[in-house]
């Protein structure tokens, strides 16, 4: 309906395989990034940043990471929480060990570390498939959480067993610590999200992505036509791990500032991120964003309605939240097993063919 | 016709225009072809090099000035280059219909004595080889797609790219010759020879000079203000004069870009991708497209369908006027622009007409509804009247004066006069040189002053000065009672129904008219599905009583409207039948441009005509058919003959006096 | 005989008994997975839910009291009656059957033919849902559950073992009872699935849905039944753990404990579940006993998983699963 | 062993058949107790169309799986280009230039036709993860280069119109063609076709045969195909191996095979199953 594609033709393969081949989509994308980078920073305040934007940005990174593993490569993982913890603690150790280095690199390095850990726990995927693998990744979840709980070195022997993010700056602007500016933290995370999204897109639209999807769709056939399963799966774990690690690092250093591993990076975190990509849509970058947005906004919404308007006690609201999220997930899976991304795709197709039905 | 090439700034030939474009628009796209998934593009500079290489290659191969070079294939840049390359070396390009059977080709190749042929692929090569023994003068053949040809004897068979390579290699040897030959080309040297698939008898080779082509192209471009920015999609047969004028004449004159689709199946998607700004199609294409639109909208949800029809009605009301710049109420304009956002815009876009500035339809009369439909969407679709002998343009509709029932005013530099018997004559710079090797028919068509008989009957409307075509002059006859018999007039009225594809009306010299009818398989088939009527074949569907009923209704409504016209009220259809097979070019019942050869049809189906007149309720017949692969077969059927109500004509006598 | 060894023996016994409970929960998974290919993550929450319900019924709580109070400003707590444990258990069982029917009717009937991962996600959704419902219905505070099971140290064992080794094993009566009940239940289930008509039908469904349908087995019925059985297992497990450590959220985590058991035993093998359960139970207790102190303890949290993981790398099809021959 | 026969010859339709490119020596394959292939030897020459035929369950597919490295025979060796093939994973075999199609189509349902065919090019994909992540320089150039190659295959097999369609939406016949395209995209030195005509109607079979011949003719690809429909094979292939119950009961030109009594008895009897 809004699409005008006549005359929008491609004369090079580069143009044909670009991220947004359709002009209209491309412009929409420019518009969104314009708003995200040049408008929002000037209008947001602490509440919006902490309640919505930071969690959304950071979970999006995690969701993209997990989506690469689950949605693109078909390796189900329930260890996301644990891997985020690795990112967080990795970042913490780096921040405290090399205060002079920019936090930017700490976060990146934390991602790197996580991807190594992720690969270690991914190795069994060569032998184990499906649910067995899913459960196996729980090993990572519990072991890692236990590790950060029990080995004092990781939390620098602090009495509380917590880790607290010291103040760090980028270009002299504080992005971690108690007194940060809303826009600063927002932009800091936004930059990471943008980088991650671009990387993910590039990987998934090219050879690597096809290799992953081949493994996902039919691993045996894939191997017979020349896909090296080891390389494919390991690379998926590595990339996924990197993203998840980065998100974990940001989650701790920028968003929370202080973390007690058990409650922040527990099994529920793993499921939360998994829900995000299921609801958003497996095998879709857009889906990762949509899912993250959905599950970040929903609780905020519920809280505002129940506590704010109906004046319920918060604990009840929390229970109801559980109930509703659970219900929603089920309804979603029944209505559209392929998630928001699929709805989006269908809608887009309809708009492109408008006024024709097909 | 004492114009000289001064009028066109010394650009006396297509190759000359090529040189100019290469200089002026060097970096601008000249040709695009969807191949290997993207639009491969050649700028004018590239084109100039490609053509030069080919030309040199041709000289190298021994092509001499005045030789005839046949060109057989679907629209591809290579063939357009070939045409110009052939011209550059002083030879004459002769494009053929690539879907015509071997023996048809044999005739044309033999008639013009072609020594060379540039063809597309194995299929065409095989066809030519099959008839080669009938062609004594034929020597070399050049093919573009090497697939499956490697094992052929290559003594006289060459790959296009190799010829070009040889040309490049031999540049030093031949470039001077090429330049010399090019410079010899004048405004009166032959530009191209096109064979008209005459509705009767063997095709005739129409010789068109550079003057004909360039002058007509130039005039037409100025008439519609075409410029180098236009995009066109070349998909109509290359052997047809229209394609030559648009894709060569106008393209070279203005320097706009010619786009070639990837394959017939992808034609529609390619059309949408390119979104031409200047578009030409025969009525048939618009008809089928409209039918598809309606069919597709049938499947749409209730709301959408309502919205669609609601706004289409509004468009019918004001769309045309808005396009013609006539005054329209503000509210209507607003509603129209809303409709444009919701329906017209998207629809045009999905159909690929999103960017069309000027669109033409010609060759046959187009149904008013169809015509209005496209115009009401805001597509500037116009009609023109022309023929090969005139290098297309005889009359055209100027913007703002567009109507379904006329073909517009005389094109620039065209003089027209109507003979007493109503036949239309014209004279223009576009008038052809001669019919090749056929002085008699040349003389019979074109007189000493250069007036050419169109063979069509028509008249100018006093008020508007627009030309109206009644019918082909030779088809116009007299009924037994002396009243006028103009089959086309009635046939068109019937053909405007989406479920009627072809009609052949008989009645010359008879006391009443009868008709053969072909149903449109797409439309009727779809209708059948919706009313779950099962059918196995065209024949079965055509014989279905329900179908016959609908057709009968159409016939009777048409009879009513025919009766209203005093001159032609005698032409009402008294009896009709729905043919058991589609009229087909392969069976010689139609021309390659899908015009009915009524004489041939008449005697091929003589038994049916007789049956229609002797009043039998049914008739059994057997007909020979030709399959795509050339095999012959025969189908037999028993057809039901229907009587159609006719309106008793009272004032007819009055009209006659 | 060295003390270490004696302690080890005690630990071993405790492990064995924990293992039986694991096996019990694992069975719940296996049953559903066998019959419907659904990996029911909600098993644990079902245990929690059943336990909550049980307590609620016994103490005559008003369901959704908090919600009602919060919305209408009323102040409801209890109906003021107490239901004897036995009856309460029956009622709770009824609730679980009802739940099974709803789950089948509202969730899985609409997900027939979806990929396993989707079904799995659905059960996670179900888990969240049930947890929410449970808490809203009965409140989330930790509750004591006492259906009259014996508790406290078993003196007889204490004395006898003391007589033998000069050290009395500390074995909780509850554990013994639990073990016995679990053992009985396990046997019952095995017998049920092997020898009863429904059981055979269930296995038939597991092997081949179409075939099952063609011989006139109602999938719907089977699935409801399976979910009910799973509900029953959950209830029993709920009672055991509830009595032991109070009814609270952590109850739902014991389900996760059953996962490594499944990996060891194989998702489809009942004996696998049993043996796996025992191995895990014993294994993690012994590991904690032997290694735990050196690495800071609480190794139960992950030992089971890591063990299963390592095990699987060498035998992907699990203990009792047959070798997978890949075809193209 | 290195006695690769080099006596190349030319077929009557003008194709050159080179020396032996692959040789199976005394292959025996068992599943548990079942013997799928029993001591079979034959060779494949460069540029020829080599058919393995036999009734259903004769062990044809197993043989193909052995060639493509998916099954490892208990006894016997595979010689490729004169070298004894060491035990290797299927993907390594593929990377040696042995591509195949599958009897019951094994396309990647979640991807478009184009992407499916692109996966055939993995052999030619060299750029590293990082390069791809940045989508610059080598990675992009490589992507484009391979796209060009793939587009030529797509053009060759006449599937332009479905280029961007998800394979899951395609009819059976087209899927088979896409799979062939994927195999061709690898520019294989040996192309294995597993019952390329299975489940096709007459017309589709004709198309497929045409494509197989064209492939062999245009690219000179060596083709080994298995098929239980004897008729089709005889017109296509240069030499035929006939298997029955895991044993080789005939080997030679179609005519030789046709007149081989053992074949007639064992095969033709059950040909029309």
Image: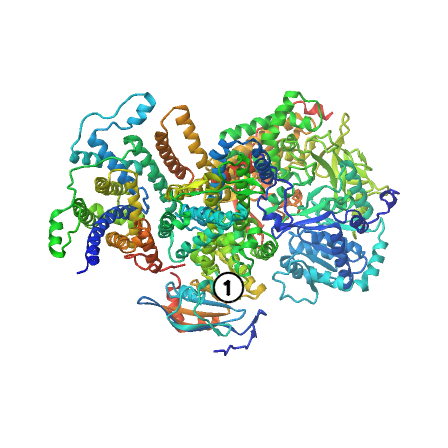
Q: How many marks?
A: 1
- Residue A12 percent across, percent down from the top left: 64, 50
Q: Is mark 1 on a helix, strand or loop?
A: helix
Q: In which quarter of the image is the N terminus of chain A?
A: top right
Pick the residue in front: B117 or A271. Answer: A271
Crowd tier of the residue under label 1, counting other residues whose Cα lies within 10 Å: few below 14, some 14–19, many 20 or above: many
| Colouring method of the image | rainbow
Side of A310 where C89 appears, left or right: left
Pick the residue in front: B580 or B153. Answer: B153
Pick the residue in front: B197 or B240. Answer: B240
Q: In this view, does D260 lie above or below B465?
A: below
Q: Is residue B586 visible?
A: no
Side of C210 where A341 appears, left or right: right
Label 1: chain letter? D
Q: In this view, does A344 lie above or below D182?
A: above
Side of C322 where B615 appears, left or right: right
- Residue A288 percent across, percent down from the top left: 48, 42
- Judging by the rendered image, the residue that carries numbered circle 1 is D95
Q: Is residue D200 above or below residue B344?
A: below
- Residue A144 percent across, percent down from the top left: 38, 50
Q: In which quarter of the image is residue B346?
A: top right
Q: Is residue D142 visible?
A: yes
Side of B560 where A307 appears, left or right: left
């Amino acid at each position: 309906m809004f699409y005008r594609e006549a005359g929008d033709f491609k004369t090079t393969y580069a143009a044909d395989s670009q991220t947004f081949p359709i002009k209209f989509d491309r412009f929409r994308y420019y518009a969104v990034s314009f708003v995200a980078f040049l408008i929002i920073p000037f209008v947001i305040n602490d509440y919006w940043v902490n309640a919505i934007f930071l969690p959304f940005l950071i979970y999006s990174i995690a969701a993209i990471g997990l989506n690469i593993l689950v949605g693109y490569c078909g390796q189900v993982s329930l260890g996301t929480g644990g891997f985020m913890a690795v990112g967080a603690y990795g970042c913490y150790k780096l921040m405290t060990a090399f205060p002079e280095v920019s936090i930017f690199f700490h976060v990146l390095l934390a991602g790197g570390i996580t991807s190594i850990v992720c690969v270690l726990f991914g190795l069994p995927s060569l032998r184990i498939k499906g649910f067995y693998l899913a459960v196996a990744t729980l090993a990572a979840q519990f072991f890692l959480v236990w590790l950060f709980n029990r080995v004092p070195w990781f939390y620098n022997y602090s009495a509380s067993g917590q880790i607290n993010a010291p103040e760090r700056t980028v270009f002299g602007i504080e992005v971690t610590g108690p007194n940060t500016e809303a826009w600063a933290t927002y932009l800091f995370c936004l930059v990471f999200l943008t980088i991650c999204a671009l990387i993910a897109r590039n990987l998934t639209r090219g050879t690597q992505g096809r290799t992953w999807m081949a493994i996902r769709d039919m691993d045996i056939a894939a191997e017979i036509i020349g896909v090296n399963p080891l390389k494919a799966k390991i690379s998926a774990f590595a990339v996924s791990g990197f993203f998840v690690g980065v998100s974990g690092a940001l989650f701790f250093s920028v968003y929370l500032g202080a973390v007690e591993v058990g409650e922040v990076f527990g099994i529920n975190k793993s499921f939360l991120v998994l829900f995000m990509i299921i609801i958003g849509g497996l095998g879709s970058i857009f889906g990762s964003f949509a899912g993250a947005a959905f599950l970040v906004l929903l609780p905020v919404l519920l809280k505002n309605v129940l506590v704010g308007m109906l004046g319920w006690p918060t604990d009840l609201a929390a229970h109801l939240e559980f109930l509703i999220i659970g219900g929603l997930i089920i309804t979603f899976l029944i209505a559209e097993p392929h998630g928001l991304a699929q709805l989006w795709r269908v809608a887009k197709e309809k708009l492109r063919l408008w006024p024709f039905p097909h | 016709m004492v114009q000289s090439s001064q009028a066109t700034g010394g650009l006396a030939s297509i190759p000359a225009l090529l040189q100019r474009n290469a200089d002026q628009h060097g970096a601008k796209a000249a040709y695009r072809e969807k191949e290997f998934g993207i639009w491969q593009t050649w700028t004018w500079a590239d084109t100039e090099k490609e053509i030069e290489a080919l030309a040199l290659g041709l000289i190298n191969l021994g092509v001499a000035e005045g030789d005839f070079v046949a060109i057989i294939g679907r629209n591809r840049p290579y063939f357009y280059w070939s045409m110009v390359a052939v011209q550059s070396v002083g030879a004459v390009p002769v494009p053929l219909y690539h879907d015509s059977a071997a023996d048809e080709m044999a005739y044309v190749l033999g008639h013009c004595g072609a020594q060379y042929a540039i063809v597309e692929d194995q299929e065409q090569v095989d066809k030519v080889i099959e008839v080669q023994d009938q062609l004594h003068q034929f020597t070399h053949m050049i093919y573009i797609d090497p697939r499956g040809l490697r094992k052929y004897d290559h003594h006289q068979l060459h790959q296009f790219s190799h010829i070009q390579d040889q040309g490049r290699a031999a540049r030093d040897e031949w470039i001077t010759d090429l330049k010399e030959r090019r410079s010899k080309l004048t405004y009166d040297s032959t530009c191209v020879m096109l064979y008209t698939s005459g509705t009767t008898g063997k095709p005739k080779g129409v010789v068109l000079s550079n003057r004909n082509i360039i002058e007509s192209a130039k005039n037409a471009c100025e008439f519609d203000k075409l410029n180098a920015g236009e995009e066109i999609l070349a998909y109509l047969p290359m052997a047809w004069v229209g394609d030559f004028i648009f894709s060569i004449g106008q393209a070279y004159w203005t320097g706009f870009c010619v786009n070639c689709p990837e394959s017939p199946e992808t034609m529609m998607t390619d059309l949408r991708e390119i979104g031409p700004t200047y578009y030409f199609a025969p009525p048939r294409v618009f008809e089928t497209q409209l039918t598809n639109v309606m069919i597709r909208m049938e499947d749409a949800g209730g709301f959408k369908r309502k919205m669609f029809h609601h706004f289409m009605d509004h468009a019918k009301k004001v769309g045309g006027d808005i396009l013609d710049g006539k005054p329209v109420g503000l509210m209507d304009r607003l509603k129209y622009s809303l409709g444009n956002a919701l329906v017209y815009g998207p629809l045009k876009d999905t159909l690929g007409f999103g960017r069309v500035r000027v669109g033409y339809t010609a060759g046959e009369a187009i149904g008013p509804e169809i015509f209005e439909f496209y115009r009401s969407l805001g597509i500037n679709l116009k009609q023109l009247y022309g023929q090969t002998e005139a290098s297309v343009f005889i009359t055209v509709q100027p913007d703002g004066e567009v109507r379904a029932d006329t073909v517009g005013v005389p094109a620039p530099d065209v003089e027209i006069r109507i003979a007493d018997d109503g036949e239309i004559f014209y004279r223009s710079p576009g008038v052809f040189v001669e019919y090749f090797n056929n002085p008699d028919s040349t003389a019979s068509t074109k007189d000493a002053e250069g007036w050419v008989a169109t063979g069509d009957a028509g008249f100018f409307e006093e008020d508007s000065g627009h030309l109206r075509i009644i019918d082909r002059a030779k088809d116009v006859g007299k009924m037994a009672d002396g009243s006028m018999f103009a089959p086309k007039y009635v046939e068109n009225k019937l053909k405007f129904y989406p479920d009627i594809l072809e009609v052949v009306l008989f009645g010359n010299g008879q006391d009443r008219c009868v008709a053969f009818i072909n149903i449109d398989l797409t439309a009727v088939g779809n209708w059948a599905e919706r009313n779950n009527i099962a059918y196995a074949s065209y024949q079965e569907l055509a014989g279905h009583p329900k179908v016959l009923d609908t057709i009968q209704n159409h016939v009777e409504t048409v009879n009513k409207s025919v009766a209203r016209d005093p001159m032609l009220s005698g032409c009402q259809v008294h009896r009709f039948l729905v043919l058991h097979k589609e009229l087909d070019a392969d069976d010689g019942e139609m021309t390659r441009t899908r015009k009915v050869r009524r004489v041939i049809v008449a005697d091929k189906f003589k038994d049916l005509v007789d049956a229609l007149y002797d009043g039998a309720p049914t008739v059994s017949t057997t007909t020979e058919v030709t399959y795509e692969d050339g095999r012959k077969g025969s189908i037999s059927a028993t057809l039901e003959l229907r009587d159609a109500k006719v309106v008793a004509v009272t004032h007819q006598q009055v009209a006659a006096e | 005989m060295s003390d270490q060894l004696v302690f080890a023996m005690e630990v071993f016994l405790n492990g064995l008994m924990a293992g039986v409970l694991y096996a019990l929960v694992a069975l719940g998974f296996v049953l559903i997975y066998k019959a419907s290919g659904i990996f029911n993550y909600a098993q644990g929450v079902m245990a929690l839910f059943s336990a909550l319900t049980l307590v609620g019924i016994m103490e005559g709580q008003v369901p959704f009291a908090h919600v009602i109070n919060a919305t209408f400003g009323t102040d409801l707590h209890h109906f003021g009656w107490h239901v004897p444990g036995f009856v309460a258990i029956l009622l709770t069982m009824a609730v679980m059957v009802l739940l099974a029917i709803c789950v089948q009717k509202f969730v899985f009937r609409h997900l027939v033919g979806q990929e396993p991962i989707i079904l799995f996600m659905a059960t996670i959704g179900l888990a969240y849902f049930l947890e929410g419902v449970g808490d809203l219905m009965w409140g989330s505070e930790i509750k004591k559950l006492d259906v009259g099971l014996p508790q406290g140290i078993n003196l007889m064992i204490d004395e006898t073992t003391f007589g033998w080794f000069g050290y009395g094993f500390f074995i909780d009566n509850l554990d013994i009872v639990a073990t016995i009940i679990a053992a009985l239940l396990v046997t019952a289930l095995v017998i049920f699935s092997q020898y009863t008509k429904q059981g055979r039908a269930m296995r038939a469904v597991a092997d081949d849905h179409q075939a099952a349908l063609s011989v006139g087995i109602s999938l719907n019925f089977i699935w409801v039944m399976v979910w009910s059985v799973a509900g029953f297992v959950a209830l029993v497990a709920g009672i055991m753990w509830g009595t032991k450590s109070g009814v609270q959220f952590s109850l739902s985590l014991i389900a996760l404990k059953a996962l490594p058991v499944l990996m060891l035993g194989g998702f489809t093998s009942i004996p696998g579940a049993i043996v796996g359960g025992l191995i895990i139970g014993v294994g993690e207790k012994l590991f904690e006993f032997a290694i735990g102190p050196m690495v800071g303890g609480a190794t139960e949290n992950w030992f089971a998983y890591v063990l299963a993981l390592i095990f699987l790398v060498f035998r992907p099809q699990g203990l009792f699963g047959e070798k997978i021959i890949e075809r193209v | 062993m290195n006695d690769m026969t080099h006596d190349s010859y030319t077929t009557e339709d003008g194709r050159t058949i080179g020396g032996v490119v692959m040789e199976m020596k005394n292959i025996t394959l068992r599943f548990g107790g079942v013997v799928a292939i029993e001591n079979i030897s034959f060779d494949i020459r460069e540029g020829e169309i080599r058919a393995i035929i036999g009734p259903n369950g004769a062990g044809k597919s197993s043989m193909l799986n052995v060639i493509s490295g998916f099954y490892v025979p208990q006894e016997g060796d595979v010689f490729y280009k004169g070298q004894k093939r060491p035990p290797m994973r299927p993907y390594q075999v593929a990377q040696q230039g042995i591509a195949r199609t599958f009897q019951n189509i094994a396309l990647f349902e979640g991807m478009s036709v184009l992407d499916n065919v692109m996966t055939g090019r993995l052999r030619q994909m060299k750029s590293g993860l990082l390069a791809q992540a940045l989508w610059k320089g080598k990675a992009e150039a490589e992507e484009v280069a391979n796209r060009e190659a793939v587009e030529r295959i797509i053009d060759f097999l006449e599937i332009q119109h479905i280029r961007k369609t998800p394979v899951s939406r395609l009819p059976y016949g087209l899927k088979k063609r896409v799979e062939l395209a994927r195999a061709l995209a690898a520019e294989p030195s040996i192309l294995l076709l597993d019952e390329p005509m299975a489940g096709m109607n007459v017309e589709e079979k004709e198309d497929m045969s045409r494509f197989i011949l064209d492939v062999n003719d245009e690219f000179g690809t060596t083709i080994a195909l298995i098929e239980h429909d004897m008729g089709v094979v005889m017109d296509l292939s240069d030499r035929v191996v006939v298997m029955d119950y895991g044993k080789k009961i005939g080997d030679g030109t179609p005519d030789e095979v046709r007149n081989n009594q053992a074949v007639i008895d064992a095969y033709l009897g059950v040909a029309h199953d």
